[in-house]
Amino acid sequence: MSEKSFLPILGGSSWRSAATVLAFALITPACGGAVQSGVAVGKVGQGLGEHAHGAPQGAEVCALQEALSTPTPGAAEKPTSESCAKAAKSDQLWHRALQALGAYGETLETMASGAGSDTTGQLEAAQTGVRGADWIDVDSASEQAARTAVTNLVNQLATNPSKGDLGGAVKAAAPSVKTLCDGLTSYLETQAHALADIEKDAEKRRAARTERRCGALDTRPVCVGDSMVDRMVYASAFGQIATLESAHLEAHDAVAGFCAAHLKLEAAATAGTLSKDQTYADVVEAVKSVHRAQPQVGMSGKAEPAPAKK
């Protein structure tokens, strides 16, 4: 139905007056509408929390490395729970970092869409589970810095000091986001490469056919190897390692994409160009330009070059 045929039904004597009102109604949302660059970065960011289900798994990487290591004859074997305790703590820290960035991304999208209020970010902060400054015990200086960054970012979400102002929120979060971006990409990359090395080491040992499982039968030593059970165990381990490596690489790429996009958003917030079409284009290009690493598992020992550090 054309504009002229529809508007008289509204009851006005002149369809032109109604057309003017309708046109104004259609363009009004655009004047105070969403900041598309902020919405885009928010969408990229809120997906990071989903990767926390499968990565990082540094504790499992540590346990696999322990299993492949050759024990020292006569030496007491240290329990895995003890030798991999540090890796388990690191996992908890970086899991929370992913969740905090995801919560921040969700809050950004709400603010950028124009639906923000004084309470925006409070629920997202609560869902991270971060309480207080010492919510986890960490050792290294880099992980202490990451813990502080998570704490600061979550506190920002909970208190909303910018009162819904997108530019203010982005600039306030920038230092914490950078710290978490640097730490997460490094940690995820390290675990992915370690998993590829584990797979190659296990494959070499399987191909050598020198590994044996030994027991005793009537006090006599009995050793077996390369049985159907052994092959099934290896097949299961191969699939698990490949899945873990892929999960770490996907999480790495997702973090790198968000970090690159956030840098563009931060620059635009400083320059006052958040609403410019070029800023949105820059954000999209930043996500597209992230190097997508390929799993090393199954590459005949040829390692994929490590993603370039930003």
Image (spheres, rainbow, N blue to C red):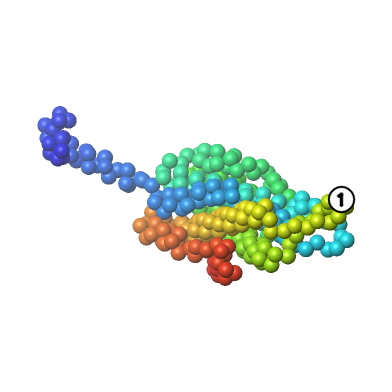
Residue 140 found in image quarter: bottom right
Q: Identify whether 155 is placed above or below 212.
A: above
Labels in figure, total: 1
Furthest residue in direction top, as rendered = 11
Q: Position of residue 147 (x, y in %)?
A: 66, 52
Few, some or many C-alpha atoms within 10 Å of disc 1 (few <14, some 14-19, many ≥20)? few
Which residue is painted at 69% across and 67% down in the image?
A: 208
Residue 279 found in image quarter: bottom left
Which residue is painted at 41% across and 45% down in the image?
A: 113
Q: Quadrant of the N terminus?
A: top left
Residue 71 found in image quarter: bottom right
Q: Position of residue 156 (x, y in %)?
A: 57, 47
Q: Is residue 264 left or right of residue 195?
A: left
Q: Quadrant of the C terminus?
A: bottom right
Along the viewing direction, whichever of 277 and 102 lies nearer the viewer: 102
Which residue is painted at 50% across and 45% down in the image?
A: 107
Tell me the residue that label 1 is attached to. Answer: 218
Q: Position of residue 267 (x, y in %)?
A: 47, 60
Q: Position of residue 283 (x, y in %)?
A: 43, 58
Q: Identify whether 125 is placed above or below 225.
A: above
Q: Is residue 81 visible?
A: yes
Q: Is residue 15 visible?
A: no
Along the viewing direction, whichever of 36 and 269 lies nearer the viewer: 36
The secondary structure type at the circle numbered 1 is loop
What amino acid does circle 1 point to?
A: Asp
Which residue is painted at 69% across and 45% down in the image?
A: 135
Along the viewing direction, whichever of 237 and 155 lies nearer the viewer: 237
Along the viewing direction, whichever of 218 and 129 lies nearer the viewer: 218
